[in-house]
Image (spheres, rainbow, N blue to C red):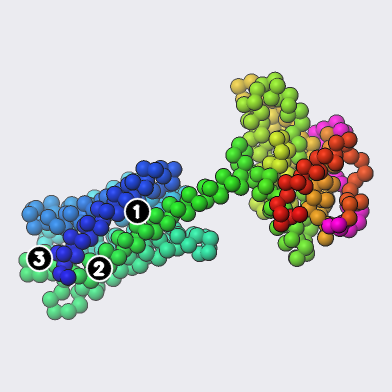
Amino acid sequence: MHSPTLLILATILMGIMTMMLMAAWRFNRQIAGFGLWAGSYFFGTLFCVSLMVRSAVPEIWSVIAAQSLLFLMAYLNLRGTRAYVGRPRGSPGYAALAALLLIAISAYFTVIQPDPGIRFTLSSLVAGVIFLRCARTIAQGKVAEFPARHLYAAVCGGHGAFLLIRPWLFSLGNSGLFDATQAIAVSQFVMIEAIAAIVLMAFGIVMLANEQVTLELRNIAERDPLTGVFNRRSFLTLLDKSISQSERMPADLSIMLIDLDHFKRINDTWGHRSGDEALRHFVAVATPCIRNGDIIGRVGGEEFAILLPNTGLSEAEAAANRLCNEVAAKPLENEHGAIALTVSIGVTHHLRGEAPEVTLHRADNAMYMAKNGGRNQVKVALCLGNGSRSDPPENAIAATRPEASGKADSLKLDLPQSVR
Protein backbone atom coordinates (compact mmCIF):
# COMPACT_ATOMS: atom_id res chain seq x y z
CA MET A 1 0.00 0.00 0.00
CA HIS A 2 1.54 3.35 -1.00
CA SER A 3 1.61 6.57 1.01
CA PRO A 4 -1.29 8.49 -0.65
CA THR A 5 -3.61 5.55 0.02
CA LEU A 6 -2.48 5.43 3.64
CA LEU A 7 -3.10 9.17 3.95
CA ILE A 8 -6.63 8.74 2.60
CA LEU A 9 -7.20 5.88 5.05
CA ALA A 10 -5.89 8.00 7.92
CA THR A 11 -8.21 10.86 6.94
CA ILE A 12 -11.24 8.57 6.79
CA LEU A 13 -10.40 6.98 10.16
CA MET A 14 -9.83 10.39 11.72
CA GLY A 15 -13.22 11.57 10.47
CA ILE A 16 -14.99 8.46 11.76
CA MET A 17 -13.33 8.78 15.18
CA THR A 18 -14.26 12.46 15.30
CA MET A 19 -17.93 11.74 14.62
CA MET A 20 -17.91 8.90 17.16
CA LEU A 21 -16.38 11.08 19.89
CA MET A 22 -18.67 14.01 19.07
CA ALA A 23 -21.72 11.74 19.36
CA ALA A 24 -20.48 10.22 22.62
CA TRP A 25 -19.72 13.68 24.04
CA ARG A 26 -23.25 14.85 23.23
CA PHE A 27 -24.65 12.29 25.67
CA ASN A 28 -21.84 12.56 28.24
CA ARG A 29 -21.23 16.28 28.57
CA GLN A 30 -20.64 15.86 32.30
CA ILE A 31 -17.33 14.08 31.63
CA ALA A 32 -14.59 16.66 31.99
CA GLY A 33 -12.32 16.93 28.95
CA PHE A 34 -14.47 14.84 26.62
CA GLY A 35 -15.43 17.80 24.44
CA LEU A 36 -11.81 18.92 24.18
CA TRP A 37 -10.74 15.44 23.08
CA ALA A 38 -13.45 15.46 20.41
CA GLY A 39 -12.20 18.88 19.30
CA SER A 40 -8.67 17.50 19.11
CA TYR A 41 -9.82 14.81 16.68
CA PHE A 42 -11.74 17.39 14.66
CA PHE A 43 -8.60 19.44 14.09
CA GLY A 44 -6.72 16.20 13.41
CA THR A 45 -9.18 15.47 10.61
CA LEU A 46 -8.62 18.94 9.15
CA PHE A 47 -4.85 18.37 9.38
CA CYS A 48 -5.16 15.19 7.31
CA VAL A 49 -7.31 17.03 4.76
CA SER A 50 -4.71 19.81 4.53
CA LEU A 51 -2.05 17.23 3.68
CA MET A 52 -4.26 15.77 0.95
CA VAL A 53 -4.85 19.14 -0.76
CA ARG A 54 -1.41 20.68 -0.19
CA SER A 55 -0.45 20.43 -3.86
CA ALA A 56 -3.44 22.60 -4.85
CA VAL A 57 -2.71 25.35 -2.29
CA PRO A 58 0.16 27.86 -2.23
CA GLU A 59 2.98 26.42 -0.14
CA ILE A 60 2.99 29.14 2.52
CA TRP A 61 -0.71 28.66 3.25
CA SER A 62 -0.35 24.90 3.20
CA VAL A 63 2.49 25.07 5.74
CA ILE A 64 0.65 27.50 8.01
CA ALA A 65 -2.52 25.41 7.93
CA ALA A 66 -0.68 22.13 8.60
CA GLN A 67 1.42 23.53 11.47
CA SER A 68 -1.56 25.29 13.08
CA LEU A 69 -3.89 22.28 12.85
CA LEU A 70 -1.29 19.83 14.17
CA PHE A 71 -0.56 22.15 17.11
CA LEU A 72 -4.27 22.55 17.89
CA MET A 73 -4.77 18.78 17.77
CA ALA A 74 -1.96 18.15 20.27
CA TYR A 75 -2.82 21.13 22.48
CA LEU A 76 -6.53 20.29 22.81
CA ASN A 77 -5.57 16.73 23.67
CA LEU A 78 -3.44 18.09 26.51
CA ARG A 79 -6.22 20.42 27.66
CA GLY A 80 -8.71 17.57 27.66
CA THR A 81 -6.33 15.36 29.63
CA ARG A 82 -5.73 18.02 32.27
CA ALA A 83 -9.47 18.70 32.57
CA TYR A 84 -10.21 14.99 32.99
CA VAL A 85 -7.86 14.58 35.96
CA GLY A 86 -9.04 17.87 37.50
CA ARG A 87 -5.86 19.86 36.97
CA PRO A 88 -5.82 23.53 35.87
CA ARG A 89 -5.90 23.72 32.10
CA GLY A 90 -3.13 26.31 31.97
CA SER A 91 -3.14 29.77 30.43
CA PRO A 92 -4.27 29.81 26.78
CA GLY A 93 -2.11 32.89 26.31
CA TYR A 94 1.10 30.85 26.50
CA ALA A 95 -0.32 28.33 24.05
CA ALA A 96 -1.29 31.11 21.63
CA LEU A 97 2.21 32.57 21.89
CA ALA A 98 3.77 29.15 21.23
CA ALA A 99 1.50 28.67 18.21
CA LEU A 100 2.42 32.08 16.78
CA LEU A 101 6.13 31.35 17.21
CA LEU A 102 5.70 27.98 15.50
CA ILE A 103 3.87 29.58 12.58
CA ALA A 104 6.38 32.43 12.30
CA ILE A 105 9.39 30.12 12.25
CA SER A 106 7.70 27.81 9.77
CA ALA A 107 6.87 30.77 7.53
CA TYR A 108 10.49 31.94 7.69
CA PHE A 109 11.76 28.52 6.59
CA THR A 110 9.17 28.49 3.81
CA VAL A 111 9.50 31.94 2.24
CA ILE A 112 12.83 33.47 3.30
CA GLN A 113 15.04 30.43 3.74
CA PRO A 114 13.14 27.38 2.47
CA ASP A 115 14.01 24.30 4.48
CA PRO A 116 11.31 21.61 4.78
CA GLY A 117 13.58 19.55 7.04
CA ILE A 118 13.64 22.21 9.74
CA ARG A 119 9.88 22.70 9.49
CA PHE A 120 9.33 18.98 9.81
CA THR A 121 11.69 18.71 12.78
CA LEU A 122 10.10 21.70 14.53
CA SER A 123 6.54 20.40 14.24
CA SER A 124 7.61 16.91 15.32
CA LEU A 125 9.39 18.21 18.44
CA VAL A 126 6.53 20.51 19.51
CA ALA A 127 3.82 17.87 19.04
CA GLY A 128 6.01 15.18 20.62
CA VAL A 129 6.59 17.22 23.79
CA ILE A 130 2.86 17.96 24.12
CA PHE A 131 1.88 14.29 23.77
CA LEU A 132 4.51 13.29 26.35
CA ARG A 133 3.01 15.84 28.74
CA CYS A 134 -0.39 14.24 28.12
CA ALA A 135 1.06 10.86 29.08
CA ARG A 136 2.61 12.24 32.25
CA THR A 137 -0.61 14.02 33.24
CA ILE A 138 -2.97 11.07 32.79
CA ALA A 139 -0.77 8.35 34.34
CA GLN A 140 -2.15 8.75 37.87
CA GLY A 141 -3.24 6.15 40.39
CA LYS A 142 -2.49 2.44 40.44
CA VAL A 143 -2.75 0.44 37.23
CA ALA A 144 -5.20 -2.00 38.82
CA GLU A 145 -7.49 0.87 39.87
CA PHE A 146 -7.25 2.98 36.71
CA PRO A 147 -6.22 0.73 33.80
CA ALA A 148 -7.77 3.05 31.19
CA ARG A 149 -5.58 5.96 32.30
CA HIS A 150 -2.41 3.94 31.97
CA LEU A 151 -3.43 2.58 28.57
CA TYR A 152 -4.06 6.10 27.32
CA ALA A 153 -0.79 7.27 28.86
CA ALA A 154 1.09 4.46 27.10
CA VAL A 155 -0.41 5.37 23.72
CA CYS A 156 0.21 9.12 24.14
CA GLY A 157 3.72 8.48 25.47
CA GLY A 158 4.58 6.10 22.66
CA HIS A 159 3.26 8.48 20.00
CA GLY A 160 5.06 11.42 21.57
CA ALA A 161 8.34 9.52 21.74
CA PHE A 162 7.99 8.50 18.09
CA LEU A 163 7.40 12.11 17.08
CA LEU A 164 10.58 13.16 18.88
CA ILE A 165 12.81 10.60 17.19
CA ARG A 166 11.07 10.77 13.80
CA PRO A 167 13.30 13.54 12.34
CA TRP A 168 16.41 11.59 13.29
CA LEU A 169 15.04 8.35 11.85
CA PHE A 170 14.30 9.90 8.48
CA SER A 171 17.56 11.79 8.23
CA LEU A 172 19.21 8.39 7.71
CA GLY A 173 19.78 7.04 4.20
CA ASN A 174 20.82 8.59 0.94
CA SER A 175 17.68 10.34 -0.22
CA GLY A 176 16.36 11.32 3.19
CA LEU A 177 12.74 12.30 3.82
CA PHE A 178 12.39 15.05 1.25
CA ASP A 179 12.16 14.71 -2.51
CA ALA A 180 13.60 16.97 -5.19
CA THR A 181 10.66 19.40 -5.17
CA GLN A 182 11.07 19.93 -1.41
CA ALA A 183 7.59 18.55 -0.67
CA ILE A 184 7.26 16.08 2.18
CA ALA A 185 7.13 12.53 0.84
CA VAL A 186 4.84 10.96 3.43
CA SER A 187 6.48 7.80 4.68
CA GLN A 188 4.46 4.60 4.87
CA PHE A 189 5.99 3.93 8.26
CA VAL A 190 4.90 7.35 9.55
CA MET A 191 1.36 6.85 8.28
CA ILE A 192 1.04 3.37 9.77
CA GLU A 193 2.17 4.66 13.16
CA ALA A 194 -0.24 7.60 12.90
CA ILE A 195 -3.16 5.31 12.02
CA ALA A 196 -2.38 3.03 14.96
CA ALA A 197 -2.12 6.03 17.31
CA ILE A 198 -5.43 7.47 16.02
CA VAL A 199 -7.33 4.26 16.71
CA LEU A 200 -5.70 3.45 20.05
CA MET A 201 -6.08 6.98 21.45
CA ALA A 202 -9.76 7.07 20.48
CA PHE A 203 -10.22 3.67 22.12
CA GLY A 204 -8.44 4.99 25.22
CA ILE A 205 -10.70 8.06 25.35
CA VAL A 206 -13.80 5.86 25.22
CA MET A 207 -12.37 3.73 28.04
CA LEU A 208 -11.70 6.87 30.07
CA ALA A 209 -15.31 7.96 29.55
CA ASN A 210 -16.48 4.54 30.70
CA GLU A 211 -14.21 4.80 33.74
CA GLN A 212 -15.76 8.14 34.67
CA VAL A 213 -19.31 6.84 34.26
CA THR A 214 -18.45 3.81 36.40
CA LEU A 215 -16.99 6.04 39.12
CA GLU A 216 -20.11 8.21 39.08
CA LEU A 217 -22.39 5.18 39.39
CA ARG A 218 -20.27 3.85 42.24
CA ASN A 219 -20.42 7.23 43.92
CA ILE A 220 -24.22 7.28 43.59
CA ALA A 221 -24.41 3.81 45.12
CA GLU A 222 -22.02 4.56 47.99
CA ARG A 223 -22.70 8.20 48.85
CA ASP A 224 -25.56 10.07 50.44
CA PRO A 225 -26.85 12.37 47.67
CA LEU A 226 -27.62 15.25 50.04
CA THR A 227 -24.42 15.50 52.07
CA GLY A 228 -21.89 13.62 49.93
CA VAL A 229 -20.70 11.39 52.80
CA PHE A 230 -21.02 7.60 52.81
CA ASN A 231 -24.55 6.32 53.04
CA ARG A 232 -25.69 3.85 55.71
CA ARG A 233 -25.01 0.70 53.73
CA SER A 234 -21.52 1.75 52.64
CA PHE A 235 -20.60 2.92 56.13
CA LEU A 236 -21.58 -0.40 57.68
CA THR A 237 -19.60 -2.26 55.02
CA LEU A 238 -16.56 -0.08 55.75
CA LEU A 239 -17.07 -0.67 59.46
CA ASP A 240 -16.92 -4.41 58.90
CA LYS A 241 -13.71 -4.08 56.85
CA SER A 242 -12.12 -1.77 59.42
CA ILE A 243 -12.93 -4.18 62.24
CA SER A 244 -11.37 -7.07 60.32
CA GLN A 245 -8.27 -5.00 59.63
CA SER A 246 -7.95 -3.78 63.23
CA GLU A 247 -8.14 -7.36 64.51
CA ARG A 248 -5.47 -8.53 62.07
CA MET A 249 -3.02 -5.73 62.88
CA PRO A 250 -4.02 -5.48 65.81
CA ALA A 251 -4.93 -1.78 66.16
CA ASP A 252 -7.32 0.46 68.08
CA LEU A 253 -10.67 1.33 66.53
CA SER A 254 -13.19 3.82 67.89
CA ILE A 255 -16.53 5.08 66.67
CA MET A 256 -18.77 8.10 67.22
CA LEU A 257 -22.52 8.26 66.76
CA ILE A 258 -23.78 11.83 66.33
CA ASP A 259 -27.28 13.25 66.44
CA LEU A 260 -28.19 16.82 65.46
CA ASP A 261 -30.09 18.28 68.42
CA HIS A 262 -33.65 19.54 67.87
CA PHE A 263 -33.46 18.85 64.15
CA LYS A 264 -37.25 18.51 63.85
CA ARG A 265 -37.58 22.03 65.23
CA ILE A 266 -35.43 23.34 62.36
CA ASN A 267 -37.67 21.65 59.79
CA ASP A 268 -40.86 22.81 61.48
CA THR A 269 -39.67 26.41 61.98
CA TRP A 270 -37.70 27.21 58.84
CA GLY A 271 -38.72 24.43 56.46
CA HIS A 272 -37.12 21.32 55.05
CA ARG A 273 -34.78 23.34 52.86
CA SER A 274 -33.15 24.76 55.97
CA GLY A 275 -33.04 21.25 57.40
CA ASP A 276 -31.13 20.06 54.34
CA GLU A 277 -28.79 23.02 54.66
CA ALA A 278 -28.21 22.14 58.31
CA LEU A 279 -27.17 18.59 57.37
CA ARG A 280 -24.76 19.85 54.72
CA HIS A 281 -23.46 22.49 57.13
CA PHE A 282 -22.71 19.86 59.75
CA VAL A 283 -20.69 17.82 57.24
CA ALA A 284 -18.82 20.95 56.17
CA VAL A 285 -17.92 21.68 59.79
CA ALA A 286 -17.13 18.07 60.71
CA THR A 287 -14.88 17.24 57.76
CA PRO A 288 -11.97 19.52 58.79
CA CYS A 289 -12.22 18.17 62.34
CA ILE A 290 -11.36 14.59 61.37
CA ARG A 291 -8.31 13.01 59.76
CA ASN A 292 -8.03 11.89 56.16
CA GLY A 293 -8.23 8.24 57.19
CA ASP A 294 -11.40 8.69 59.27
CA ILE A 295 -14.73 7.68 57.73
CA ILE A 296 -17.92 9.67 58.08
CA GLY A 297 -21.34 8.39 57.09
CA ARG A 298 -24.97 9.35 57.37
CA VAL A 299 -26.74 6.47 59.09
CA GLY A 300 -30.13 8.05 59.70
CA GLY A 301 -32.20 11.16 59.01
CA GLU A 302 -30.15 13.49 61.22
CA GLU A 303 -27.73 10.90 62.57
CA PHE A 304 -24.12 10.50 61.49
CA ALA A 305 -21.34 8.12 62.43
CA ILE A 306 -17.60 8.62 62.30
CA LEU A 307 -15.18 5.69 62.25
CA LEU A 308 -11.77 6.41 63.76
CA PRO A 309 -9.14 3.79 62.84
CA ASN A 310 -5.97 3.56 64.92
CA THR A 311 -7.59 5.70 67.62
CA GLY A 312 -7.92 4.90 71.29
CA LEU A 313 -10.94 5.78 73.41
CA SER A 314 -9.38 8.84 75.06
CA GLU A 315 -8.26 10.22 71.69
CA ALA A 316 -11.72 9.61 70.24
CA GLU A 317 -13.32 11.42 73.18
CA ALA A 318 -11.04 14.41 72.64
CA ALA A 319 -11.91 14.47 68.93
CA ALA A 320 -15.63 14.26 69.75
CA ASN A 321 -15.38 17.20 72.16
CA ARG A 322 -13.57 19.28 69.52
CA LEU A 323 -16.29 18.47 67.02
CA CYS A 324 -19.07 19.24 69.50
CA ASN A 325 -17.53 22.64 70.33
CA GLU A 326 -16.87 23.44 66.67
CA VAL A 327 -20.49 22.78 65.64
CA ALA A 328 -21.82 24.93 68.48
CA ALA A 329 -19.44 27.76 67.58
CA LYS A 330 -20.46 27.85 63.90
CA PRO A 331 -24.19 28.38 63.39
CA LEU A 332 -25.80 27.89 60.01
CA GLU A 333 -26.11 31.16 58.09
CA ASN A 334 -28.92 31.36 55.54
CA GLU A 335 -31.74 33.69 54.49
CA HIS A 336 -33.39 33.21 57.89
CA GLY A 337 -30.29 34.47 59.71
CA ALA A 338 -28.07 32.48 62.05
CA ILE A 339 -29.51 29.11 63.06
CA ALA A 340 -27.76 27.61 66.08
CA LEU A 341 -26.76 23.96 65.81
CA THR A 342 -25.56 21.55 68.48
CA VAL A 343 -24.89 17.83 68.50
CA SER A 344 -25.03 14.96 70.95
CA ILE A 345 -22.23 12.45 70.52
CA GLY A 346 -21.74 8.93 71.82
CA VAL A 347 -18.22 7.48 71.72
CA THR A 348 -17.06 3.92 72.22
CA HIS A 349 -14.18 1.60 71.45
CA HIS A 350 -14.32 -1.68 69.53
CA LEU A 351 -13.20 -4.74 71.48
CA ARG A 352 -11.33 -7.56 69.82
CA GLY A 353 -13.72 -10.34 68.75
CA GLU A 354 -16.77 -8.15 69.23
CA ALA A 355 -19.57 -8.11 66.67
CA PRO A 356 -20.07 -4.79 64.83
CA GLU A 357 -23.67 -4.46 66.00
CA VAL A 358 -22.52 -4.72 69.63
CA THR A 359 -20.13 -1.80 69.18
CA LEU A 360 -22.83 0.23 67.45
CA HIS A 361 -25.35 -0.59 70.18
CA ARG A 362 -22.95 0.69 72.84
CA ALA A 363 -22.21 3.90 70.93
CA ASP A 364 -25.94 4.39 70.31
CA ASN A 365 -26.69 4.13 74.03
CA ALA A 366 -23.93 6.62 74.81
CA MET A 367 -25.35 9.07 72.27
CA TYR A 368 -28.81 8.93 73.85
CA MET A 369 -27.29 9.42 77.29
CA ALA A 370 -25.85 12.65 75.88
CA LYS A 371 -29.29 13.66 74.56
CA ASN A 372 -31.07 12.76 77.79
CA GLY A 373 -28.38 14.58 79.77
CA GLY A 374 -29.16 17.94 78.16
CA ARG A 375 -27.71 17.61 74.62
CA ASN A 376 -24.69 19.47 73.20
CA GLN A 377 -22.30 17.10 74.94
CA VAL A 378 -20.25 13.94 74.58
CA LYS A 379 -20.78 10.69 76.46
CA VAL A 380 -18.34 7.80 76.43
CA ALA A 381 -19.37 4.14 76.67
CA LEU A 382 -16.61 2.46 78.68
CA CYS A 383 -15.58 -1.03 77.57
CA LEU A 384 -15.37 -3.18 80.68
CA GLY A 385 -14.46 -6.51 79.11
CA ASN A 386 -14.04 -8.52 75.95
CA GLY A 387 -17.13 -8.78 73.79
CA SER A 388 -18.22 -11.88 71.95
CA ARG A 389 -20.05 -12.37 68.66
CA SER A 390 -22.43 -14.77 70.34
CA ASP A 391 -22.85 -13.08 73.72
CA PRO A 392 -25.11 -10.10 74.48
CA PRO A 393 -23.43 -6.72 74.97
CA GLU A 394 -22.76 -7.15 78.69
CA ASN A 395 -19.93 -4.61 78.50
CA ALA A 396 -22.23 -1.88 77.17
CA ILE A 397 -23.03 1.05 79.41
CA ALA A 398 -25.88 0.40 81.75
CA ALA A 399 -27.87 3.58 81.28
CA THR A 400 -30.01 3.51 78.14
CA ARG A 401 -33.03 5.34 76.84
CA PRO A 402 -36.34 3.42 76.88
CA GLU A 403 -36.32 2.80 73.12
CA ALA A 404 -32.60 1.95 72.91
CA SER A 405 -33.15 -1.68 71.99
CA GLY A 406 -35.31 -0.73 69.03
CA LYS A 407 -32.64 1.61 67.79
CA ALA A 408 -29.97 -1.05 68.01
CA ASP A 409 -32.15 -3.54 66.18
CA SER A 410 -32.60 -1.14 63.27
CA LEU A 411 -28.85 -0.82 62.96
CA LYS A 412 -28.39 -4.55 63.06
CA LEU A 413 -31.06 -5.40 60.51
CA ASP A 414 -29.44 -3.21 57.85
CA LEU A 415 -25.98 -4.66 58.23
CA PRO A 416 -24.62 -6.32 55.05
CA GLN A 417 -24.56 -10.12 55.02
CA SER A 418 -20.77 -10.12 55.50
CA VAL A 419 -21.17 -8.20 58.76
CA ARG A 420 -23.83 -10.37 60.34
First reached walking from the N terminus: tag 2 or tag 1: 1
Magenta-drawn segment = 372-390
In this rendering, which labeled residue sits more in front, label 2 or label 1?
2
Q: Is residue 86 above or below residue 342?
A: below
Kindly check if marks 3 and 2 are in contact, taking CB atoms under 8 A apart as contact.
no
| Residue farthest toward the bottom in the current orientation of the protein | 174
Q: Position of residue 183 (x, y in %)?
A: 11, 64
For badge 1, the amino acid type reads Asn
First reached walking from the N terminus: tag 1 or tag 3: 1
Q: Position of residue 10 (x, y in %)?
A: 23, 60
In the image, which disc is placed on residue 77? 1
Question: Is any atom of residue 6 visible in this view?
Answer: yes
Q: Nearer the viewer, residue 151 or 81?
A: 151
Q: Position of residue 146 (x, y in %)?
A: 50, 60
Q: Residues within 10 Å of mark 2 (few under 14, many from 20)?
A: some
Q: Residue at x 42, y 63 (%)?
A: 151
In the image, which disc is placed on residue 182? 3
Q: Position of residue 105 (x, y in %)?
A: 19, 56
Q: Is residue 236 above or below residue 125?
A: above
Q: Which residue is mark 2?
A: 192
Kindly check if marks 1 and 3 are in contact, taking CB atoms under 8 A apart as contact.
no
For badge 2, the amino acid type reads Ile
Q: Residue at x 39, y 59 (%)?
A: 204
Q: CA distance from mark 1 to mark 3?
A: 30 Å
Question: Is any atom of residue 104 visible in this view?
Answer: no
